[in-house]
């Protein structure tokens, strides 16, 4: 009996460290699913519009994406439960806005989206650091962080525009699509120039986003892709012409 208890405890420890396959509700490490949902969230901003129905669609997608990311990242219940409650309240508010034709659910997409952008990246990074083997799931998780960074900056730009309008030079009444579009154009360093920040703070944040986006792609993501299939205990072989280390020479002299 004690042996079975010890085995289960060891298995749980290995499972938590990502050293064995996880069995459970099927949502652990589902970062490919989360990546698809994040793309759907971004598209929803463009096609759902500013109406109550569009907000409901956006909140449902954002909430589902948030819960999938948190569950995939194996966050504790003290984090998962409050997030689920916030998502539920936002969905109810959007439904009430449709039924009673008011603006009760106007802030729903903003609240859930901000929660997704703030909580998602650290949860994913924490889980990826426990991965024993670098695989497509690991790369998908890293790409999720990249998309979440774009969403985070879009909400940051929106916040600045709310408190110090106008944010853009070209328009004084930007909508959610403008902020999301500008954020991802910036993080990808495309620089179309059809939307540009008006104030110094917006310009500096846009430059920061562009730098972070490029460094992240050419370092973190490229490094993961270059090491696909390797385990964290593997080390690259030393070059053939590399001289032996001091420790190796001392060991050879002693023998």
Image (tube, rainbow, N blue to C red):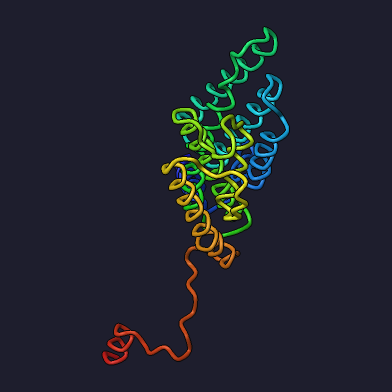
| Of 97 and 125, the residue lying toward us | 97
Q: Farthest top residue?
A: 100
Q: Residue at x 49, y 59 (%)?
A: 215
Q: Based on the displayed image, in which of its 4 quarters is residue 59 positioned?
A: top right
Q: Quadrant of residue 93?
A: top right
Residue 245 vertical placement versus 228 (above, below): below
The quadrant in which residue 46 appears is top right
Q: Position of residue 247 (x, y in %)?
A: 30, 83
Residue 68: x and y in percent read 60, 36
80, 3: nearer the viewer: 80
| Image position, residue 19 (x, y; %) | 52, 54
The number of discs equals 0
Give the residue displayed 47% in from the left and 51% down from the top. 207
**Quarter that holds the C terminus:** bottom left
Up-down: is 13 above or below 46? below
Report the front residue among 252 and 79.
79
The residue drawn where x is 65% and y is 39% is 42
User: Can residue 4 be seen by looking at this rendering?
Assistant: no
Relative placement, left or right, of 38 versus 205 is right
Residue 103 position within the rendered picture, expressed as x and y whole percent measured from the top left: 61, 14
Q: Nearer the viewer, residue 54 or 131?
A: 54
**Residue 97, visible in the rendered structure:** yes
Judged from this view, the residue extending furthest toward the right is 47
At 48% from the left and 56% from the top, the residue drawn is: 211
């Amino acid at each position: 009996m004690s042996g079975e208890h010890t085995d289960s405890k060891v298995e749980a420890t290995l499972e938590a460290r990502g050293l064995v396959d996880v069995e459970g509700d099927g949502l652990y490490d589902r970062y490919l699913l989360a990546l698809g949902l994040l793309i759907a969230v971004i598209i929803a901003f463009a096609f759902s519009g500013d109406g109550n129905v569009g907000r409901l669609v956006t909140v449902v997608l954002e909430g589902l994406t948030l819960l999938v990311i948190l569950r995939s990242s194996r966050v504790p219940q003290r984090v998962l439960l409050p997030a689920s409650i916030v998502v539920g309240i936002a969905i109810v508010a959007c439904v009430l806005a449709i039924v009673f034709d008011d603006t009760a659910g106007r802030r729903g997409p903003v609240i859930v989206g901000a929660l997704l952008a703030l909580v998602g990246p650290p949860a994913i990074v924490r889980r990826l650091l426990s991965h024993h083997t670098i695989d497509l799931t690991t790369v998908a998780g890293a790409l999720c962080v990249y998309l979440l960074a774009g969403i985070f900056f879009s909400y940051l730009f929106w916040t600045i525009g709310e408190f110090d309008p106008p944010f853009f030079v070209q328009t004084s009444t930007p909508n959610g699509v403008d902020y999301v579009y500008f954020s991802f154009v910036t993080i990808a360093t495309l620089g179309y120039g059809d939307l540009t920040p008006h104030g110094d703070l917006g310009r500096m944040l846009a430059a920061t986003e562009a730098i972070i986006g490029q460094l992240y792609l050419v370092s973190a993501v490229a490094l993961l892709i270059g090491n696909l299939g390797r385990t964290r205990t593997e080390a690259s072989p030393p070059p053939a012409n590399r001289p032996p280390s001091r420790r190796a020479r001392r060991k050879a002299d002693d023998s």
